Amino acid sequence: MSIEEQYRTRAKELLSGGAVKMVIGYSKGSNASRRRPLFISSPDDVDRLVLDDACIQNLSGYLVSEGLLSDEKRVAVFLRPEGIRAINILAAESQLDAEQIVVFGFDVIGNEVQALKVIHVEEFSDVINSIKERAPEAAEEELFERIEKMSPKERFSFWQEEFSKCIKCYACRQACPMCYCRRCIVDSNQPQWVNTSSHTLGNFEWNIVRAFHLSGRCVECGNCDRACPVNIPLRLINHRMAEEVLGAFDHFAGTSKTQEPVLASFKKDDSETFIL
Amino acid sequence: MTKILFRDKLDKCVKQWKSDGLTVIGPVQRANISTYAAVDHAAEFDFDLVLPDRSIKDLFFPQSEPMLRYTIKKESINTDECLPPSGPRIIFGARPCDASGMAIDDPLFGWDYKDEYWFQRRNESVIVTIACTKADDFCMCTSLKMAPDSSKGSDILLRPLAGNNGWQVEELTDRGREAFKTISDLLQESADTAASLAVVEKKFDLDACVAWLQNPENFESRFWKEISMRCIGCASCTYLCPTCHCFDIQDEGDTYTGIRRKNWDSCSFALFTMHTSGHNPRSTQSARWRQRIMHKFNYFPGKFSVNSCSGCGRCSRQCPVDMGITETLQEISTLSL
């Protein structure tokens, strides 16, 4: 039985028995290469679920949709390891109760879909640690290396050109499971803390604010990068920040649901004499 | 015999237009995105694109526009109005869906207050449209009763030659004729035939959809919640749309000096309709998506007798969660049977 069939069967069991109220997975999209998020609450609909190497969107952000988990019922969700890390962070930041989440884990190695045969978030620590080991290679791409070699001035103009394309559609924010604020700082308009204009200053303000808010929290699922309609290589910023945090604090985001947020916790014996 | 502009003459045309004082704009690939931008040479154009990622709207209704600068002193308040940068321009190589998008928005920007920012740019621009010989999975002009060679909103319509070495020229407006007068020596009469047009499959029955949307019973239909469940509430669809035109006015600066700007805004955002009291009449994403569809296919045509959609398909093409107008109207087509 293929993983897709196994997961359909399991979804059917869970929904018919009332063990979960909803399964969040993928269905066919508008053309052969696209998949789209699918929400099913009836066992009759499980045949619409699709699982293949085109299922790349991290679906964990839907779990913090307003009201979804407030009835304390369980929800099942298709997640790759990055999605599972995101659940850990959301749990650590008190945004959800990991007990309510049933995981349909999978990973795509090459073109092949592999099942991750565990159900609860805490059982994935081996998987997550293995990702931590391979993390440094994850963003090895020509562009990343080219930017690393630039002088600060060149790097600034590179990002200036990239950010000049930003249209402030906030697709990066909306696609990101970590951007769950009910009211984002840029939407706080009494007073308007951050310019809404997408001129140079406004675009820098937005993209830098987001990069800092994601430092030590981003799981590099790539949702923002894929969502960006103007092709700003956001993955590179987030990868750079993740490297910094890993190097400075040995912090790999999302290893457990009790992991302390690296930039929001302190110890008395920290070497710094100040808190930012 | 038809009037033909051969490709190898285009660079000379660009030079001529520039010496006539026109800014020459067209489809280009820059910094990993395709858009309409000013060029110096014809070689910069990219005519192989199905259509640019960014729409032509940006050239008439920029995402951020300064309106006035202000300084407030003890005894006086000074304001300096900012008008759009003026100067004639020619947009060479627009797609029919983009050009018609501008014509769709003309009545909106002129019905009560005549928006001088919009109309100054409209009056100073010549739009030279190239009919489409290619389409992708998301093109849907035919579903909107338009075609790959619609001339709506264009001053000149060019039909690519079968040999891909030039275009048949059809002059549509005085403004177009004026701009092509100075390059008339570069045009030739020839019997070259036009390439066949792109085949754009019809994806939904527009009349049936409109009838369904106009039925007040369907305003509270369960359909809206189901179709928009995966909508993440970004503004990718509205900001890439050639006809979406909503904006917000913001003052940037401090109590003493600053600038008033007109910035794009989107009905996808929760903040769009948030009242000062905190009440939001469109408090859910499904209400916001319904508004976008109703506006385009019910309210806008009710007021201006034209749908606020030109069928470019950018909303579906770029949607991070594979939604869009096409899918929604396809679903409505089946509901209205």
Image (cartoon, helix red, strand yellow):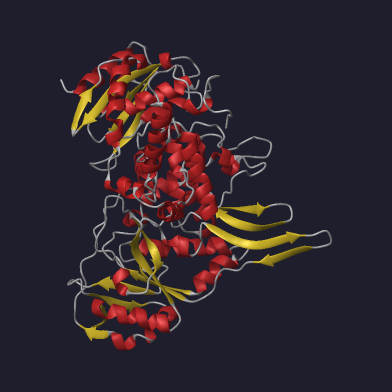
Quadrant containing the C terminus of chain B is top left
Query: Is residue B9 shown left or right of residue A154?
Result: left
The location of residue B33, given as percent across then percent down, is 35, 56
Q: Residue at x 28, y 35 (%)?
A: A138
Viewed as shown, does residue B144 lie left or right of A96? left
Q: Residue at x 43, y 56 (%)?
A: A157
Compared with residue B179, is residue B274 higher up or lower down, i.e. above or below? above
Quadrant containing the N terminus of chain B is: bottom left
Pick whichever, B145 or A54, lies toward us.
Answer: A54
- Residue A131 appears in the rendering: yes
B181 or B72, which is in the foreground? B72
Q: Position of residue A6 (x, y in %)?
A: 21, 19
The spot of residue A132 in percent (x, y) is 31, 26
Outermost residue to the right: B75
Q: Can residue B232 be seen at all in this image of the molecule?
A: no
> In the figure, B158 relative to B259: above or below?
below
Q: Is residue A141 left or right of residue B295?
A: left
The spot of residue A268 in percent (x, y) is 55, 19
Residue toward you, A134 or B52: A134
Judged left or right of residue B327, residue B123 is right
What residue is drawn where x is 67% and y is 41%? A190
Q: What count of labels does the image hold?
A: 0
Instruction: Give the residue at the far left of this rendering.
Output: A1
